[in-house]
Image: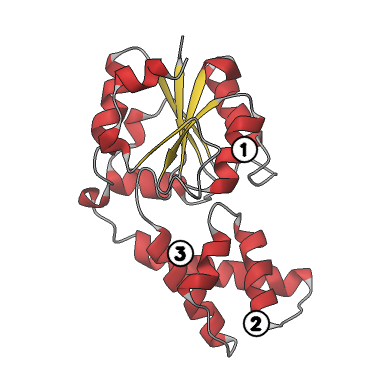
């Protein structure tokens, strides 16, 4: 039986992708090149430092590690200025209701996100209390598609990987879930998330029956 649901943050619980994109675009502009929405697709589900490497590659810029750290901090400052103004109504449709449904049915919940700002976002959205465990970029060393974030989530919940279902909107996240030995529900396009066990448009399309059907 399914004992736990693990959720990615961006694109599943809330859409902060727009804020990430604006922050990366501002950083690129400061360095003298354009960063398009098409370029931004390469950053989905990728850690901050790995995203910076992609950005610098697009701009044809080479920097040492110290310079990269400064830029990553600068990007995060841009991003934080946006998310610190977020309101609870920015939660994606069905997310709060499904989290509540899980808990009402005795299913543990965990966040599994590369974001180092996950706690800030959850607090702004007033969702922190709906998660039994929060594993974010401050607790992990390896980026998706490595399964570390989800395996740590299962460990913190005290649940076997085979009893977990992951909700992901990125291809790398789906691969991470499957590598962890977990079932995966894709949120978004069936073409991009074809490896997921099922694909839905959002958590407003999920219920307990669909969850149990995964086993």
Front disc: 2 or 3: 2
> Tag on residue 59?
2
Label 3 sits on a secondary structure element that is helix
Instruction: Residue lying at the far left in this picture: please name it.
Output: 89
Tell me if I can see residue 22 in this picture: yes
* Figure check: 34 above or below 143: below
Q: CA distance from mark 2 to mark 3?
A: 17 Å
* Figure check: 198 above or below 58: above
Image coords of residue 163 (percent x, y): 52, 15
Q: Are marks 1 and 3 in contact (CB under 8 Å)?
A: no
* Figure check: 160 above or below 137: above
How many numbered discs? 3
Question: Residue at 40% of width from left, 65% of height from top?
Answer: 19
Label 1 sits on a secondary structure element that is helix
Question: Residue at 75% of width from left, 71% of height from top?
Answer: 66
Which comes sooner in the sequence, label 2 or label 3? 3
Residue highlighted by disc 1: 176
Q: CA distance from mark 2 to mark 1?
A: 29 Å
> Tag on residue 20?
3
Tell me if I can see residue 78 in this picture: no
Q: CA distance from mark 1 to mark 3?
A: 21 Å
* Figure check: 156 above or below 95: above
56 or 70: nearer the eye?
56
Indicate the quadrant where residue 59 lies: bottom right
């Amino acid at each position: 039986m399914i004992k736990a649901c693990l959720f990615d943050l961006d694109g599943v619980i809330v859409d902060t992708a727009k804020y990430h994109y604006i922050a990366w675009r501002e950083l690129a502009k400061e360095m003298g090149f354009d960063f398009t929405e098409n370029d931004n697709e390469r950053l989905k589900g990728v850690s901050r430092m790995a995203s910076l490497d992609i950005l610098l590659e697009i701009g044809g810029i080479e920097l040492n590690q110290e310079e990269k750290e400064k830029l990553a901090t600068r990007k995060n400052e841009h991003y934080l200025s946006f998310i610190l103004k977020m309101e609870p109504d920015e939660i994606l449709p069905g997310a709060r209701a499904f989290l509540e449904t899980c808990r009402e049915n005795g299913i543990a919940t965990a966040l599994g996100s590369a974001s180092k700002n996950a706690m800030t976002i959850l607090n702004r959205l007033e969702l922190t209390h709906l998660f039994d465990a929060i594993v974010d970029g401050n607790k992990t060393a390896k980026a998706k598609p490595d399964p570390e974030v989800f395996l740590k989530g299962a460990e913190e919940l005290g649940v076997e990987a085979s009893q977990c279902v992951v909700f992901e909107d990125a291809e790398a996240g789906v691969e991470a879930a499957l590598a962890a030995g977990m079932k995966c529900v894709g949120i978004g396009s069936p073409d991009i998330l074809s490896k997921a066990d099922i694909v839905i448009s959002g958590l407003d399309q999920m219920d307990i029956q669909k969850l149990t059907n995964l086993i």
